[in-house]
């Protein structure tokens, strides 16, 4: 039995939610999100509470039960508060800046890396060595942060590269003579 799936999802007053068959739509101050749930679970909405239940006792429906509940809870959290990821850039001459709607990254290559920001995500550079990614969709915010980090992941000897703000880089000792 899924302990997470059993918990009901409270919908705050500022958010409007609707369940139509297997589609869940949530609208709030930070935006609007929708989710098509899998056929193995059923979703019900009444009196400000969303409940997810498995349709049968199969292994797949029990596996999807908690995941679908978490996806719906993340949608409600996203349209009410939003999600944020912070990246840190380490290295001499490494920096980031916004050029219109695009993010320009100088990461030690012979050319600048231009990242096109997708819809639904806002990117800010409070300092040249910091990038803040925010949006309502948790998956999209994490995907954008991962793509930016993948241009120059941190290396273990000097720690140069793009890393998450709370990430720990295991440092290696250099070659000895």
Image (cartoon, helix red, strand yellow):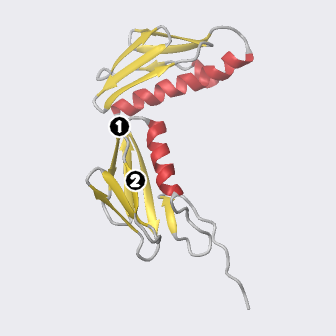
Residue 61 rendering spot, x and y as whole percentages: 67, 16
**Label 2 with label 1: CB-CB less than 8 Å:** no
Coordinates of residue 151 in the picture (x, y in percent): 51, 59
Q: Look at 44% across and 57% down and name the residue there.
A: 87
Position of residue 80 in the picture relative to residue 155 (left or right): left
The front one of 29 and 51 is: 29
Question: Residue 13 got which mark?
Answer: none
Choose the circle earlier in sequence order: 2 or 1.
2
Name the residue nearer the viewer: 54 or 152: 152
Q: Residue furthest front?
A: 110
Position of 2 with respect to 152 (left or right) is: right
Q: Is residue 112 left or right of residue 31?
A: right
Q: Which residue is mark 2?
A: 115
Q: Which residue is mark 1?
A: 120
Q: Element type at marker 1?
A: loop
Quadrant that contains the C terminus: bottom right
Residue ID at (53%, 18%): 37
Residue at x 42% of width, y 35% of height: 137
From the viewer's perspective, is the residue at label 2 or at label 1 nearer? 2
Q: Is residue 94 above or below residue 146?
A: below
Q: Does 97 sit above or below residue 93? A: above
């Amino acid at each position: 039995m899924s302990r997470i799936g059993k918990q009901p999802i409270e919908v705050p007053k500022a958010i409007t939610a609707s369940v139509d068959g297997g589609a869940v739509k949530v609208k709030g101050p930070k935006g609007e999100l929708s989710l098509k749930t899998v056929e193995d679970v059923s979703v019900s909405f009444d009196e400000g509470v969303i409940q997810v239940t498995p349709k049968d006792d199969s292994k797949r429906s029990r596996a999807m039960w908690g995941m679908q509940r978490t996806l719906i809870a993340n949608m409600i959290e996203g349209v009410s508060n939003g999600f944020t990821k912070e990246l840190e850039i380490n290295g001499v001459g490494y920096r980031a800046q916004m050029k219109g709607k695009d993010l320009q990254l100088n990461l030690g290559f012979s050319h600048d890396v231009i990242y096109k920001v997708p819809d639904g995500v806002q990117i800010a550079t409070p300092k040249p060595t910091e990038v803040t990614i925010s949006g309502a969709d948790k998956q999209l915010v994490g995907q954008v942060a991962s793509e930016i980090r993948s241009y120059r992941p941190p290396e273990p000897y000097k720690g140069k590269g793009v890393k998450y703000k709370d990430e720990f880089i295991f440092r290696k000792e250099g070659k000895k003579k």
